[in-house]
Amino acid sequence: TEPRDFVISRNHHLTTHESIYVLAQEKRYSFGLGTEEPTVANAVEELASNQRLRSALEKIMGPNPALIEMTCITTAYGADDQGWHHDVLSEASAMRFGRSFGPSYSIFIQLQNTTKEMGATEACPGTHYC
């Protein structure tokens, strides 16, 4: 519950500069997470030391996968349905930054139990867009 409690507290203190609306919806917003907060650092360490997760990531990405961005998305009560969408744009910056472009993947970790009635996340096997 520590990461969830941190996110709830952080949501109450976000400035408009720190908060980014997701899909232009005021009831769904995101903010960046850094490891300077002990709760976040502990959660990252727990994920990084999870051998099952690490093994799965290394099968997809190769040895020593790197964390390049970490955000928290909050969906407030009454938010509109997002519909099917990409979490990561496949065309992203491959053309613009060809020498430094590498594929990126999105991992979703829920900080609370969700139900179908809440609009839990769905994924399409083989793709993240249906």
Image (tube, rainbow, N blue to C red):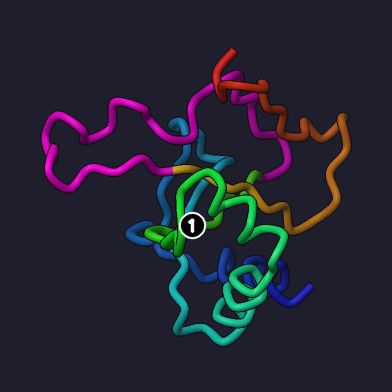
Q: Which one is in front, 101 or 72? A: 101
Residue type at mark 1: give it.
Thr
Q: How many marks?
A: 1
Q: Quadrant of residue 8?
A: bottom right
Q: Up-down: is 10 above or below 120? A: below
Instruction: Check disc 1 and report its element: helix, strand or loop.
Output: strand
- Identify the image quadrant of the C terminus: top right
Where are the magenta residues, as a range? 76-104
| Left or right: residue 69 compared with residue 43 | left
Q: Is residue 48 rendered to the left or right of residue 114? A: left
Let me know if residue 66 is in the magenta part. Answer: no
Is residue 102 inside the magenta stretch?
Answer: yes
In the rendered image, which residue does mark 1 sit on?
A: 71
State the image coordinates of residue 14 (x, y, percent, origin top left). 47, 65
Please state the horizontal and vertical placement of residue 34, each as a whole percent of the image. 44, 73
Residue at the (36%, 40%) spot, across then down: 103
Disc 1 crowd, CA 10 A, few/some/many (<14, 14-19, 20+)? few
- Image position, residue 68 (x, y; %): 37, 59
State whether residue 25 is above or below residue 65.
Answer: above
- Left or right: where does residue 86 sit relative to residue 94? right
Would residue 69 be found to the left or right of residue 47 on screen? left
Quadrant where the N terminus sits is bottom right
Nearer to me, 50 or 123:
50
Query: Toward the viewer: 76 or 106?
Result: 106
Rendering coords of residue 11 (x, y %)? 57, 64
Q: Residue furthest top?
A: 130
Residue at the spot x=72%, y=73% of the render? 5
Residue found at x 74% / y 58%: 111
Q: Quadrant of residue 84?
A: top right
Q: Residue at x 45, y 84 (%)?
A: 36
Residue 40 vertical placement versus 27 (above, below): below
Q: Main secondary structure of the magenta part?
A: loop
